[in-house]
Image (cartoon, coloured by chain):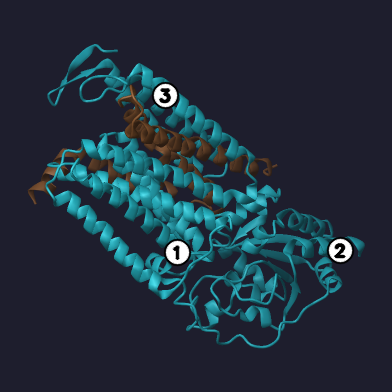
């Protein structure tokens, strides 16, 4: 029980953010028209690439004097994260561009 | 940048550190704003741009300003390694996203989702050795990041394989038991790591075992799910990736990561539930169920399927006043979207009012039909959602069902014992005439006979949708 309380107190700011962003996420997405389901999903997917920050921090402080597992896996994490971010945003833009040119 | 401004919670903070946090705040706001704008057609493109801008900002400032607990910044030599990795990822990501065919969109979205999951799992795996085992909560978030990220990765890769036709469904009653046992095993192992009281180094074997079990669970969890359930599973995996990123945000106490991740997690969950609602099924039923086993009820649908000739079809269509086209996954498989648009333009030039009726779970991802038809230049105001088109169905002269099955099955309304009972459908059976384009006489994904196909008002055109449509267009031109 103490552990649970300690966890809450240590991470109280983060837990507040989580609680509020759940509502924010639901609020922002509700009533989205079906025509945007795919681009929305794909755009959101790109945002989850924010994990790239973790990858940058990891590799940034890794020991790069020798080739080691941590470094290699960290570099992989950065590459995967970038793929998610860049691929996700570009593909979403491509879809939306397609929707746009039909407007006229 | 290194100037100390003061102390907070006993830690000194510098100008650089403050600017970094400030940039995370701006990035987080851009994510929220971007997602908000993405949910309206007029502003969607700008929204995507904003969210991308937020991401670039957060990446740059992290690279320039991040300091670890010892106060040392990112190693200058490592900056080049990171930039090279980002360069590789960007180039590959950009090229694939630009070059791939629009019809391969569901696969691509799954693939990018998999990469995000993999990155989260790797970050959690590499941070585990630094975990403070006495801080129960911080170990928990690391383990959750590893589990959820791995499941999102392997699950999305299987989904990718299925959508690309490389992986076949494996279905059987035993699968749900295997999965339950595996899931229980995963959590048992996680609890063992949490409570064992050993150091991370001693637990090295356990963390790799956890990675393996989670990856395996992701594979087996998506394996039995297919067909019309794909939109549910794809948006579910999407929300997993977000949650995994948020867990990693906990590790670094990074608010931008937490907010971005949870935002995606919540949005993905909503979309998942929306898809479930469109099928009148619970999420649990989709994951475990797979339409109540292999031998679904076939009652109620008997009689003969009546074929029609192309010339009859062309006359019927050309002299109609209103036509509704109901596309399904078959249209995407046959890549018939362009010739389909040709048909609707041709009919429109003859004064026929042509509209498309879009079922929320038609296709293999949320909004699949919209993207497919947009690629063929069909104006999006011609695409009508199910609830808006259904009242018009009785006054529709002809509805054309192209490669769709379960979403027009009247059994959902008439037959309470049907596995799809209660699922909202497009009421094609209420229109005056129905033309069904089908590859063969088989049943749909759900394995349920469709009484619409035996209806007296229904005529069938068998064959590949693309060539059938092409011939139909030629016939109408010759009239």
Which numbered mark, 3 or 2, is in the foreground of this view? 3
Please indicate whether residue A7 sits to the left or right of residue B209 in the image: left
Quarter of the image containing the C terminus of chain B? bottom right
Earlier-in-chain disc, 3 versus 2: 3
Badge 2 element: helix
Determine whether B373 is above or below B387 in the image. above
Check residue B126 in the rendering and tell me which mark sits there, or answer none.
Answer: none
Whether callout 2 and callout 1 share a subunit is answered yes
Image colour for chain B is cyan
Q: Nearer the viewer, residue B342 or B441?
A: B441
Earlier-in-chain disc, 2 versus 1: 1
Check residue B276 in the rendering and tell me which mark sits there, or answer none.
Answer: 1
Q: Nearer the viewer, residue A9 or B168?
A: B168
Which percent across, then down, holds residue B226? 51, 64
Badge 1 element: helix
Image colour for chain A is brown
In the image, what residue occupies the spot 86% across and 61% down?
Answer: B474
Q: Are marks 2 and 1 in contact (CB under 8 Å)?
A: no
Q: Are marks 3 and 2 in contact (CB under 8 Å)?
A: no
Please indicate whether residue A35 sits to the left or right of residue B243 in the image: right
Which numbered mark, 3 or 1, is in the foreground of this view? 3
Check residue B476 in the rendering and tell me which mark sits there, or answer none.
Answer: 2
Pointer 3 residue: B81
For disc 3, the chain is B
Badge 3 element: helix
Circle 2 residues within 10 Å: few <14, some 14–19, many ≥20 = many
């Amino acid at each position: 029980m103490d552990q649970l309380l300690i966890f809450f107190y240590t991470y109280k700011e983060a837990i507040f953010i989580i609680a509020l962003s759940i509502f924010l996420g639901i609020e922002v997405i509700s009533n989205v028209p079906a025509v945007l389901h795919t681009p929305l999903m794909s755009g959101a997917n790109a945002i989850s690439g924010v994990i790239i920050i973790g990858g940058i921090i990891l590799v940034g402080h890794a020991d790069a004097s020798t080739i080691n597992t941590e470094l290699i896996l960290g570099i992989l994490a950065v590459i995967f994260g970038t793929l998610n971010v860049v691929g996700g945003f570009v593909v979403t833009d491509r879809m939306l561009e397609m929707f746009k040119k039909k407007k006229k | 940048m290194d100037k100390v401004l003061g102390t907070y919670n006993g830690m000194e903070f510098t100008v650089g550190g403050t600017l970094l946090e400030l940039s995370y705040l701006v990035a987080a706001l851009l994510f929220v704003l971007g997602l908000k704008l993405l949910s309206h057609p007029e502003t969607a493109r700008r929204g995507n741009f904003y969210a991308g801008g937020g991401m670039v900002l957060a990446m740059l400032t992290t690279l320039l300003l991040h300091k670890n607990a010892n106060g040392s910044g990112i190693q200058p030599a490592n900056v080049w390694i990171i930039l090279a990795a980002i360069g590789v990822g960007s180039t590959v990501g950009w090229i694939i996203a630009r070059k791939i065919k629009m019809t391969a969109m569901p696969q691509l979205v799954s693939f990018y989702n998999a990469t995000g999951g993999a990155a989260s799992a790797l970050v959690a795996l590499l941070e585990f050795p630094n975990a403070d085992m006495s801080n129960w909560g911080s170990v928990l978030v690391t383990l959750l990041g590893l589990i959820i990220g791995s499941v999102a990765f392997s699950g999305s890769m299987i989904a990718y394989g299925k959508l690309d036709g490389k992986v076949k469904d494996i279905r059987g009653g035993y699968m749900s038991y295997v999965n339950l046992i595996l899931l229980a095993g995963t959590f048992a192992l996680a609890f063992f790591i949490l409570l064992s009281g050993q150091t991370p180094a001693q637990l090295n074997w356990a963390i790799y075992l956890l990675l393996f079990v989670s990856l395996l669970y992701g594979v087996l969890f998506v394996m039995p799910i297919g067909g019309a359930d794909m939109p549910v599973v794809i948006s579910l995996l999407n929300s997993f990736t977000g949650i995994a990123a948020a867990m990693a945000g906990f590790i670094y106490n990074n608010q931008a990561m937490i907010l971005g991740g949870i935002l995606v997690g919540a949005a993905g969950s909503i979309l998942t539930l929306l898809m479930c609602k469109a099928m009148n099924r619970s999420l649990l039923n989709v994951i475990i169920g797979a339409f109540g086993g292999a031998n679904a009820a076939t009652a109620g649908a008997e009689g003969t399927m009546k074929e029609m000739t192309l010339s009859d079809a062309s006359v019927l269509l050309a002299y109609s006043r209103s036509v509704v086209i109901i596309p399904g996954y078959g249209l995407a498989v046959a890549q018939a979207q362009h010739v389909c648009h040709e048909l609707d333009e041709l009919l429109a030039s003859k004064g026929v009012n042509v509209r498309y009726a879009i079922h929320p779970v038609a296709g293999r991802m949320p909004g699949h039909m919209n993207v497919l038809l947009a690629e063929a230049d069909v104006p999006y105001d011609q695409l009508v959602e199910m609830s808006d088109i259904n009242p018009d169905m009785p006054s529709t002269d002809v509805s054309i069902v192209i490669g769709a099955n379960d979403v027009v099955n009247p059994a959902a309304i008439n037959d309470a014992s049907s596995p799809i009972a209660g699922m909202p459908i497009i009421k094609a059976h209420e229109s005056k005439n129905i033309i069904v384009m089908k590859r063969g006489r088989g049943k749909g994904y759900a394995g349920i006979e469709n009484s619409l196909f035996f209806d007296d008002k229904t005529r069938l055109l068998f064959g590949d949708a693309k060539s059938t449509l092409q011939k139909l267009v030629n016939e109408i031109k010759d009239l």
